[in-house]
Image (cartoon, rainbow, N blue to C red):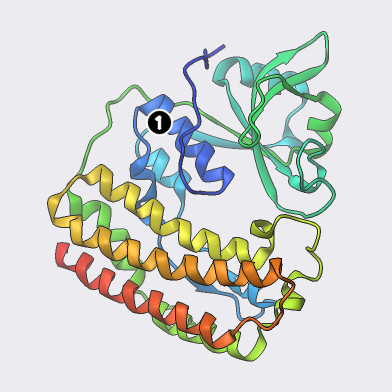
Amino acid sequence: MRNIDEFQFVDIESDCFDMLIASLTLWLKGEYRFLFTDCLGFQVNPNGASPAERIVIDKGDIIDNANKNGMGIHFRYMKDVDVNELVILLDQYNPLMAELDEYNCFWRKNYHKIHRNHYVLLIDYSAKESSFACIDTYPTNRNFALPNEFILQNMKRFLYADPDKKKLIKYPVEDYLFPTIKKFSQTSEMGTIWDRYDWFIDDIGLNFDIKKEIEDFSNIDIIYIPFIWKLKNISWSFVQFRYLLDYLDDDKLTNIEKKISEIRKHWEVMINSIAMSIIRHDSSVSIENIQDYIRKAVYSEKLLIQELSLYR
């Protein structure tokens, strides 16, 4: 079994999936920041039932980026695997990363409160106890165990890494920046990314009602309210892009990092204003202010893309 004594979680701003992939990649390949080559973007689903459902996080395929750099990550669905095969795979590729519905995670605050994907690591198996030793992202607990029955009933799928032995290759700066430049220049059925932002800003003006956004989620932490969670993921994506720029270590990118900080500030001010309205039970949050913060963020994003385009 692969020894995980030196495995540690990386301290990054992200959801648990990205954080675990980044942690595994750092442990097995010695670096993770290249994973965020394609983390920026914005999509909308006009058929969503609420503003939260109409936001589509477009942060690229972190698994694809990992595998392009030799991580050898494979997915398996539990319907195709029994406990014996799971134990064999754990013995070969420790740890396994399990996908669960947080609604069923009895050890977490959101147990029986909200349906959303959550990920934990399986790190060992006890035949005597018929259970898997696990690590969660928060709170972390190395003595945490999940019985076989729970795994069989609740684990949707899992992944494992079988990395190659090749040393990471650092490519020219423009190779890492091109996916973002390309994404922001493409056109979809909803137009350009700027058209999609304009559509969403208008949609908020017409349809955003903070009472409706929180009415089914009054008993969970604010950050997990779907509308807030989607906005936080957008905000985090700019921090993750800064991780990539730090990895590239190019003096020419200093001005870009300043623009990223400005974009992040606009998103965070907006998120905090909505969160404070929720905390104070004040449903009169200014829609115009929310729209204005988004417009400011989008304007700064346009300047960012203009700067990045100089690297083509």
Whether residue 13 is visible, yes or no, is yes
Which residue does the numbered mark 1 point to in the structure image? Answer: 26
User: The C terminus lies in which quarter of the figure?
Assistant: bottom left
Label 1: how many Cα within 10 Å (few below 14, some 14–19, many 20+): some
Instruction: Locate residue 242 relative to residue 136 in the image: left or right.
Output: left
The extreme front residue here reads 280
Q: Position of residue 146 (x, y in %)?
A: 78, 26
Q: Is residue 294 above or below residue 268?
A: below
Res. 156 image quadrant: top right
Is 195 above or below relative to 90?
Answer: below
Residue closest to the eye, 150 or 254? 254
Residue at 34% across / 52% down in the picture? 37
Left or right of residue 306: residue 14: right
Q: Residue furthest top?
A: 128
Q: Residue at x 45, y 47 (%)?
A: 62
Quarter holding residue 41: bottom left
Residue 180 image point, x, y percent: 32, 62
Amino acid identity at mark 1: Leu
Image quadrant of residue 247? Answer: top left
Report the side of 163 relative to 289 (left or right): left
Residue 46 image position (x, y, % from top left): 61, 81
Residue 235 drawn above or below residue 127:
below
Q: Looking at the image, which residue is at 41% across and 25% down?
A: 28
